[in-house]
Image (tube, rainbow, N blue to C red):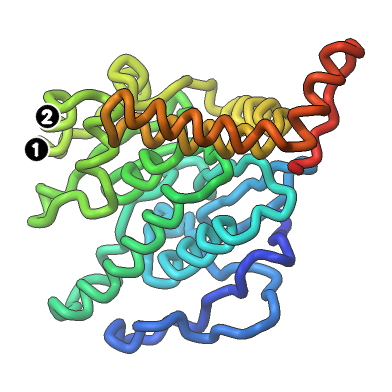
């Protein structure tokens, strides 16, 4: 798979992984010029407005090491600052076995408490940046999504899962707990009682169970996962991009505030669309019985 990245995203925050995690406070290797790729991510523009992001460490089930945390943090931060024509992002894992096994426990073996916390700060920043991404994000879960991998999928706007996919939040079996918004996103997806059962037992569950519980939106045959996710992404990308961004923000706010406050946010978001060129184009296209050509203005 080829590598691609929008030339106007923020500069890649990368450097060879240094053994002392304590040294990673500010992103190392920061330059003013855009690098062509990431060490742990494979980026490819699969259509005019759709980006496919593949977590690319298949030899370790796409586990999140420090470098992947840095790469993900930079990717989502860059998209927050400048979407540069992108209207939807699909995230998946390399290979057929795993979406992501979560944190790289081999790298974490032997870390001091302070090193562990510093590394986790990077993951915290990455997951928050992903949650704040203005562009709709689809998680295409192609295999096992365990621990932080499951939390990463939950941070997407919605999930398509291959039939072979399995999910689990196994942190309590390792003496920790979900720390990438898992205790926040999971109850919102499946309800508090189901979320407690999943988190407190650490028991893996199937794609079919995930669908029945409301965690995933759709199960796809294994070989059709990416084509079906791409078809949905293209449909999203065909809509007015400012409208989709405003609608995404409004839906996200709905789970955080009371009804009247949420509606006030909705109307504010709505009113910002009234003066756009895309609003005028949408009405013209409807009356002229043609497909609109949205420009994101």
Q: In which quarter of the image is the C terminus?
A: top right
Q: Residue at x 16, y 24 (%)?
A: 194
Q: Considering the numbered disc 1 on the image, is that residue within a helix, a strand or a loop?
A: helix
Residue 208 % position (x, y): 35, 18
Residue situated in front as seen by the camera: 148 or 85 = 85
Q: Which mark is residue 282?
A: none
Q: Where is residue 98, by image quadrant?
A: top left
Q: Residue at x 54, y 21 (%)?
A: 221
Q: Which mark is residue 200?
A: 1
Examine the rendering and report whether any part of residue 15 can be seen: yes
Question: Is residue 26 rendered to the left or right of residue 283?
Answer: left
> Whole-Å distance between the Cαs marked 1 and 2?
5 Å
Q: How many labels does the image show?
A: 2
Question: Is residue 124 rendered to the left or right of residue 271?
Answer: left
Residue 211 % position (x, y): 36, 19
Residue situated in front as seen by the camera: 208 or 139 = 139
Crowd band around label 2 with a 10 angstrom C-alpha radius: few (<14), some (14–19), many (20+): few
Q: Considering the numbered disc 2 on the image, is that residue within a helix, a strand or a loop?
A: helix
Question: Is residue 287 rendered to the left or right of residue 128?
Answer: right
Q: Which residue is drawn at 73% across and 37% down?
A: 276
Seen in the picture, residue 97 relative to 236 is either above or below; the reply is below
Answer yes or no: do the residues labelled 1 and 2 have beta carbons within 8 Å? yes
Q: Name the residue under label 2.
A: 197
Residue 37 % position (x, y): 65, 68
Crowd band around label 1 with a 10 angstrom C-alpha radius: few (<14), some (14–19), many (20+): some
Q: Where is residue 19, by image quadrant?
A: bottom left
């Amino acid at each position: 798979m080829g590598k691609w990245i929008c030339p106007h995203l923020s500069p890649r925050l990368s450097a060879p992984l240094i053994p002392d995690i304590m040294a990673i406070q500010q992103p190392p290797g920061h330059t003013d010029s855009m690098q062509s790729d990431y060490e742990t991510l494979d980026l490819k523009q699969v259509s005019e407005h759709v980006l496919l992001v593949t977590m690319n460490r298949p030899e370790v089930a796409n586990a999140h090491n420090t470098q992947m945390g840095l790469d993900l943090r930079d990717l989502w931060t860059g998209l927050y600052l400048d979407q540069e024509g992108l209207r939807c992002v699909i995230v998946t894992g390399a290979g057929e076995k795993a979406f992501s096994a979560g944190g790289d426990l081999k790298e974490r073996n032997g870390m001091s408490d302070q090193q562990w916390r510093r590394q986790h700060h990077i993951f915290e920043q990455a997951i928050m940046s992903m949650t704040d991404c203005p562009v709709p994000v689809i998680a295409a879960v192609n295999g096992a999504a365990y621990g932080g991998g499951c939390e990463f999928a939950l941070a997407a706007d919605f999930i398509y899962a291959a039939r072979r996919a399995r999910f689990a939040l196994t942190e309590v079996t390792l003496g920790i707990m979900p720390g990438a918004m898992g205790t926040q996103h999971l109850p919102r997806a499946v309800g508090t009682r189901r979320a407690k059962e999943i988190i407190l037992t650490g028991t893996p569950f199937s794609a079919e169970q995930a669908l029945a519980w409301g965690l995933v939106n759709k199960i796809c045959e294994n070989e059709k996962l990416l084509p079906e996710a791409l078809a949905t992404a293209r449909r999203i990308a065909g809509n007015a991009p400012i409208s989709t961004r405003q609608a995404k923000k409004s839906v996200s706010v709905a789970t955080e505030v009371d009804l009247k406050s949420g509606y006030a946010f909705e109307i504010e978001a709505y009113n910002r669309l009234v003066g756009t060129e895309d609003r005028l184009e949408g009405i013209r296209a409807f009356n002229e019985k043609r497909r609109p050509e949205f420009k994101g203005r």
